[in-house]
Image (spheres, rainbow, N blue to C red):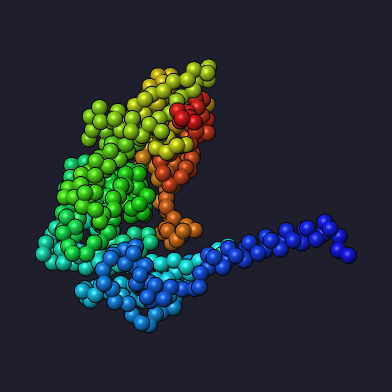
Amino acid sequence: MMDHNILKKSLRIAAVLSFFLFCAFAFSGCGHYSNREAAEWFQENVVDEGIMVSKEYTDRENSSGDAERVWTAHLKDLPEVEFELISHRTVSLFVTYDMETTYHLEMGRFYLENYMDSSPSALSGLETGTDVSEEHLTVSGIYDTASEIDTICREMGNLEDYIAAQEYPCQITYALAYREPLTFDAAEEPFTMRYTCVSEDGGASDPDILNAGTLADTLQNRARNAFAGYAAAYRLETDQFTEDQLDAAAGQYGSLRFSITRPDGTELCYPELILAYYDSMSFGCLYEVLVREGTFQVSGTPEEFTFTAANGSVCSFSYSYRVPGNSSDETSGGMPRLGSFYYLSGETKVILTDAPLIDSERFSALTGLTFDTLDH
């Protein structure tokens, strides 16, 4: 006769297996969406309009290696704009099926082409592309001075107003950023990695949420705040802002404010200064701390300066100190390998990262001080 404990253990195992089998069945559904189900999903989740979907589909594999079933489709009353309905199969713990569509991307291209036909110079200096998921059209711009922000946002706002006036909705992502000539290499650095990059999704279906001027105003405010935050963090372009604006930016990025602890245990904060990231201080911020401390031999500007470190060595920092990257090398993400910033300790180059930053450990070694965010 089977031992009672063994029987209980077998029953528990059977129950667990049954649960996992139930979950696998529940989550996997019956397989890919049919064209009728794809059309219903589109009308319920994207646009509630009549839609024509191809009877035949194409099987393909996406960049992640997952199987997709793809139909071509168009709105019943707009046959000239074709898009895809994609039944997407994902295998993790269970097999799941989801839907995607290129509707917004293709409609965005259609609207943009018509807009540019009527106003060829309306988006002068801006670039178009697709977002990371390749589901939306993106319109992006780079500015060199704060005064250019208004022009870029006005152009984007005019396009959004045009799209909002069309019969069928469409979502477009708008983005802009400062060129950052001293802190990043414009030829190498992806647009979205810029410190000052801000974006906003247009095409809200509710006119009360997105009306004329709202998107442009939102982008303007966010871009100005980001640019002021950049100036406060890197201590560059500060002449484009008043002291009140820089102080306001430091307040807005309050989570990046930090305290300095001296060797004698004294702790203090310079509230007008902020870190570039939670664990990293820019070259310019280092300069400002050294000057405010008043115990270091410092000469130069936030952009380029020399000081005597705690160990007695003469160190030189400059936003121009950079070792170029090798464009033939790629990172694990497939991007070109970026160059590295460095500083000089005597005649020795001390290589840092692809941004002009020093972390708390290096800061302590250089100055004998420590820093930490105020909300640590």
Q: Residue at x 41, y 20 (%)?
A: 293
Taking the view exactly as shown, the residue that stands out farthest to the bottom is 56
Taking the view exactly as shown, the residue that stands out farthest to the left is 118
Image check: 160 left or right of 104?
left
Quarter residue 239 falls in: top left
The front one of 303 and 34 is 34
Where is residue 197 shown, x and y percent of the image?
32, 47
Where is residue 250 shown, x and y percent of the image?
33, 31
Looking at the image, residue 45 lies above or below residue 236: below
Where is residue 354 shown, x and y percent of the image?
43, 47
Q: Residue at x 25, y 61 (%)?
A: 170
The front one of 338 and 280 is 280
Looking at the image, residue 204 lies above or below residue 57: above
Q: How many marks?
A: 0
Q: Is residue 6 visible?
A: yes
Quarter residue 56 falls in: bottom left
Q: Quadrant of the N terminus?
A: bottom right
Image check: 363 left or right of 193?
right
The front one of 279 and 62 is 62
Looking at the image, residue 324 lies above or below residue 13: above
Taking the view exactly as shown, the residue that stands out farthest to the right is 1
The front one of 25 and 289 is 25
Q: Residue at x 20, y 47 (%)?
A: 214
Where is residue 288 shown, x and y percent of the image?
37, 27
Quarter residue 286 falls in: top left
Image check: 32 left or right of 125?
right
